[in-house]
Image (cartoon, rainbow, N blue to C red):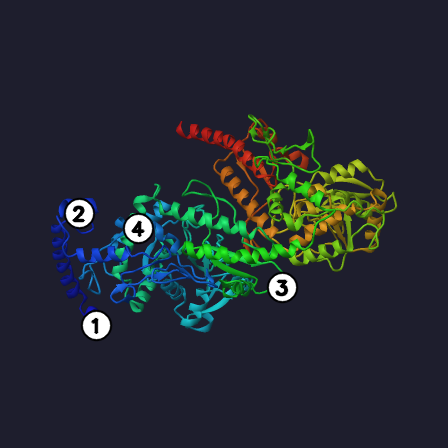
Amino acid sequence: MEEQLIRESPTKIYLTLFYLSLLLNFFFLSQHFFFLPPSRLDSTVSELRWTRRAAEEAEAVAAISCSGHGRAYVDGVLDNGRPTCECNTCYTGADCSVLLSNCSADVNSGDPLFLEPYWMSHSSESAVVFSGWHRMSYATTDRYQSIELEKHIRYLHAAVGNAITHDKYLVFGSGSTQLLNALVYALSPENSSSAATASVVATAPYYAMYKEQTNLFNGREYEWKGVTSKWMNSNKTNFIEFVTSPNNPDSLLRDSVIAHSSVIYDHAYYWPHFTAIPAPADGDVMIFTVSKVSGHASSRFGWAFIKDENVYNKVLNYMQYNSMGVSRDTQMRILKLFKVMLENIGGDEDIFKFGFNKLRKRWQRLHALVNSSSRFSLQQLSPQYCTYFENIRDPSPAYAWLKCENEEDVDCEEVLTKGGIISRGGMIFEASTRYTRLSLLKTDDHFEMLLQKLKPLVASSKENHVKIKLSWTRDAAEEAETVAAISCSGHGRVYVDGVLDNGRPMCECHTCYTGADCSVLLSNCSADVDSGDPLFLEPYWMSHASESAVVFSGWHRMSYHATDKYFQSVELEKHIRFLHAAVGNAITHDKYLVFGSGSTQLVNALVYALSPENASSVASVVANAPYYGLYKGQTELFNGRQYEWKGVTSKWMNSNKTNFIEFVTSPNNPDCLLYDSVLDHSSVIYDHAYYWPHFTAIPAPVDGDVMIFTISKVSGHAGSRFGWAFIKDENVYKKVLQYMWFNSMGVSRDTQLRMLKIVKVMLANIGGDDDGDIFKFGFDKLRRRWQRLQALVNSSSRFSLQQLSPQYCTYFEKIRDPSPAYAWLKCENEEDVDCAEVLTKGGIISRGGMIFDASTRYTRLSLLKTDDHFEMLLQKLKPLVASSKENHVKISSF
């Protein structure tokens, strides 16, 4: 009846409410105590009146002791009129002091109780008194949403810097859960015909609510269509894509992968206590929830920012008919909480600092325990720069995405259940059953119980490994471990075969660092980004130390010959083919495979094999500029009678000459672009050293007649000098084998054993956690480097970089950003004729364009070396960019 009155005569009702509101406001202002801080309250009210009873009740209940393992609540269950303790998991008794035996650690839900201590330490500021007559009406002067709360939500985002909100509408919901379906409804087409039905999708692993809610409400205008990867190449339109960033369950930052989809960005965890904030989010539709920012999950309050007015109006319409807005009691409480948070931002009592420190410590302790054996692994999370904390901060995820690594542990959730840990299995997130999610958000009791229950599971794995008693390998293993443990301050490394100082291995320092422990930064040192040394992958192998270590016995492969083949390990051949099949970057089943000491040795072997045997018919070796200088240098050095270097392919496009051998590097070195052959009827050597997912998108597997690859770029082991070639023609293959026989009698079997181990580790981790999969690890590192370099270069007009666009990658099953191995830098100023020289004067050692048969205005910067090398590059480049800015300022101010 009341709802009907509001709809039928809103003007009359609102006028009445308006005058009532004025009277009430006058009354409260005259009393001078509504929402005043305690200090002002004491000075204006001699003693509490109608609030005293409620205040005393709240204080009395809060003072009830539950032994630190539970809490009593005003609205809790009473026992003979007395509030009872509600105990944490595994505790019982009147005061929660009894620890239950054989109790399971419950780390299933995302209950954010880790923030409860923060609010207990801010009890007086965050307490709210509700009068018995507070907001009794359906509607108020500001309708369903508190104007003050709207303002303070925008203040909070501005202070944190995690979202751009000024150009968007704001709508409240009963938690983000209610808003999920409201937005699916609002973004769906109004035409309910099957052709116009919206397809709701998400990238796995995803928050299960998206699928469950969409299926439950079963709207005519939308339907659940599963994971985004199934629709990447579809012609279908009308996609609604859920993007959770940071993601639940793996805590990774994500973006949309389907072009032209309507995207709902769920930023529930995009706050500084859970993740680094690299930049403010600016999606057209963004959801947030108070449960994760302040921890008040049971208050059921969320909000969405919406760019489009039509979508906003449809959401308002949905909320009108679904719940007539959010409880005003809740809105008042959230307003008070946000005021407290805003007052403390940047100070010692900052909730984000509190939450970050607690979660970081939990993650570090769990990480150390899991890493103490090989039975389990966690998602790989790296330190990142955070604009809120203004420094590089360690990971502090809301959830641990645990993987069972043992072959027999097929269902990881079940493994943990048997060990007394209640988790949330991978299938719920449409992921493998080898994964399960552990919540790090609950109380200290829950977290300590998790560690207690996990230790025996980890220890049982250790016991299995201890069954093999080391004997003759012990000395070698101890030597390797001892040397690896020597500290070089993070700016160098010690090697077993390194130089000794009084019998002690010495640190080999990175460029610009010196001293016994590499801790001294040299002044006026040049940033060396010349070579393509792939040291950016070194941290990956250090984190996979146990799996990738190899022990060579003193009698390993002493003979020239072996039972499998003279030169090549049959197992390594198989695993190389497995790797290409798993990555999807090459078709190999119909080709011969030959090994070389790096791709360098194979380059000349293939030129020799593809040249005519008759010396009177000389082959012309060519490449498209800019090209890898080794092709020219090596061809001219060996100076074969059957072949000669003829320069760039463009000179021979219209030539009648035959017998061309064309080098095609794809992705190209130095500009990282995908290339193909340009001469008709030439013999083509495809150099695919960089055709791996950490350097480039893989649009399709390559299928050339002659294809070269190298371990130096796929795994980073350049020092091992190992490469391989796939060859279609049997005669060419036999000539290459002949060359290898007389050149080196094959590749070291020591290296082949190590490469077999390395390839096995890569295969075992393909498709796993971001830092478990070497391609995801490498891609993330190079992408970040490229983005930082690009941002610096683009801040002035003195330099420019090659243009690289996001592309769809079959390996990652999504559109991925560029992550090139090299930056092909161009000097744009007229006077900067020799770009390599310009950089040299600025303290940067690069590789000039002439080496690649290109203009001297270009120079190549390697992005493949250590973090030290890359950071030094940025440091040295900044003044060169800044000087350009100053020049521009002088002109503009003239």
Q: CA distance from mark 1 to mark 2?
A: 42 Å
Q: Earlier in the sequence, mark 4 or mark 2?
A: 2
Q: Earlier in the sequence, mark 1 or mark 2?
A: 1
Residue toward you, 460 or 882: 460
Residue 470 vertical position relative to residue 893 in the rendered view, above or below: below
Circle 4: element type: helix
**165 on left or right of 60:** right
Crowd around label 1: few <14 · some 14–19 · many ≥20 (10 Å): few
Circle 2: element type: helix
Q: Which residue is mark 2?
A: 41
Q: Which residue is mark 4?
A: 338
- Asked whether the beta carbons under mark 4 and mark 3 sit within 8 Å of each other, the answer is no
Q: Earlier in the sequence, mark 1 or mark 3?
A: 1
Q: CA distance from mark 4 to mark 3?
A: 49 Å
Q: Earlier in the sequence, mark 4 or mark 3?
A: 4
Quadrant (top left/top right/bottom left/bottom right) for the N terminus: bottom left
Specify the quadrant of the image occupied by residue 128: bottom left
Image depth: mark 1 or mark 2 in front? 2
Q: Which residue is mark 1?
A: 4
Give, as a three-letter code, the residue at label 4.
Phe
Query: Horizontal and vertical percent for residue 352?
Result: 38, 47
